[in-house]
Amino acid sequence: MGTLIEHKGGLKPAVGSVLLDSFNPEAMAETLQRSTLEHTQLSRGRFRGRLFQAQSNACRLDYGEYNLPVLARGPLAPDRISLGFLLQSPAECSFNGESARQGDLLVYGEGMELHARLAPGCRWVSLQVRRDALAEAGLALPQSLYAAYGLDKVTSSGLERDLLAGLQLLGLEGIDQGQQPDPALVMSGVEDAVISAFCRAQGARQRHQTMPSSTAAHSGNPMSIIQRAEAYMEAHLAEPITISRICARTACPVHTLERVFLKSHGVTPKQFLTYRRLTALRSLLIKHSPEDMSVTGAALNCGLMHLGRAAVLYRQLFGETPSATLKAWNRI
């Protein structure tokens, strides 16, 4: 499910990489640094992915690539500003309800909520930096912050080149350790490249305006509708949930609810509910052994009442049966 390729620590910056040969939300949450992100696979197929991380005293770096669409949501680092860059994206992604494409730079304040649908084949980098490092570069930012920048071609291609070079030097491509430079210096160079691109972006047109938290709380805001719907689903996952009940709880008609979900998630609310239940089932099966949990009990706990249908959907989504996941519980 997840294979740790490398991890180095001690006094030097820590560097680690994980290969995923099936969807493993637990391993993904544990690998991404200091996050409580929740992941949902949004289409059928055998999941393949890679996560890479590096950390120094000054900043933290995450890299990821997935072959299938994934929704990542939850609070980001509470002590750092997060700067994300889409290295590759064959199709549009969605960040907090807004479209994003390859070459875009995403900026989140400390502890802000991430709600990202990553397209299949997407490769991304996230750098978490201290606010004072940005202040030293002349960037005075509001406390509550989410912004997306469409970088110009020169800035975007230059940042992509610098990030790929830094990732290679840090060991993403398995460079000979005898030739590897000091990771602290590499991380410093990556930080400089991202902050420089951010500074240039600040001088250009900002495609999406900064969104303070009060804006996101507006009842008619699409992101607020999605968050209310998701919160209701999670709170009642083991119970019968109808689309009419979701509409009542979100105070919006069904056509509006479906439209905002399709734009943000690429699936309808009912499809998303099914994916969330199947993801919850997978998490339970991964965390338990056959001796202390049955597939039937786990499925019922996740609101999957039609067990035969649930097993078919599970296999279509994750490429293996629920019983196979449970039997392989000791792989992580």
Image: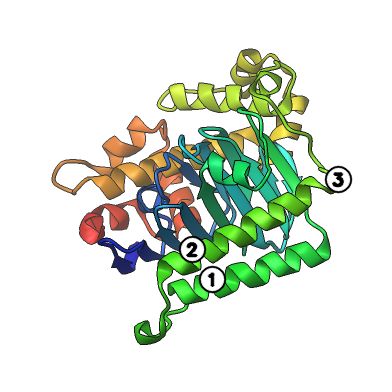
Looking at the picture, how far across and down is residue 15, in whole percent? Answer: 37, 64
Q: Residue at x 38, y 53 (%)?
A: 31
- Nearer to us in this view, 268 or 316: 268
Looking at the picture, how far across and down is residue 199, in whole percent? Answer: 72, 50
* Residue type marked 1: Gly
Return the disc, 2 or 3, that comes first in the chain's sequence: 2
Residue 249 at least partly seen: yes
- Badge 3: few (under 14), some or many (20 or more) residues near its Cα, within 10 Å? few
Task: Mark 2 vs mark 3: give the one in front.
Answer: 2
- Of helix, strand and loop, which one carries label 3? loop
Labels 2 & 1 near each other (Cβ < 8 A): yes
Question: Looking at the rendering, which quadrant does residue 114 occupy?
Answer: top right
Labelled disc at residue 323: none
- Of helix, strand and loop, which one carries label 2? helix
Q: Residue at x 68, y 43 (%)?
A: 138
Which residue is label 2 attached to?
187
In the rendered image, which quarter contains the N terminus? Answer: bottom left
Labelled disc at residue 166: 1
* Residue type marked 3: Arg
In the rendered image, which quarter contains the C terminus? Answer: bottom left
Labelled disc at residue 205: 3
C-alpha separation, residue under disc 2 versus residue under disc 3: 28 Å
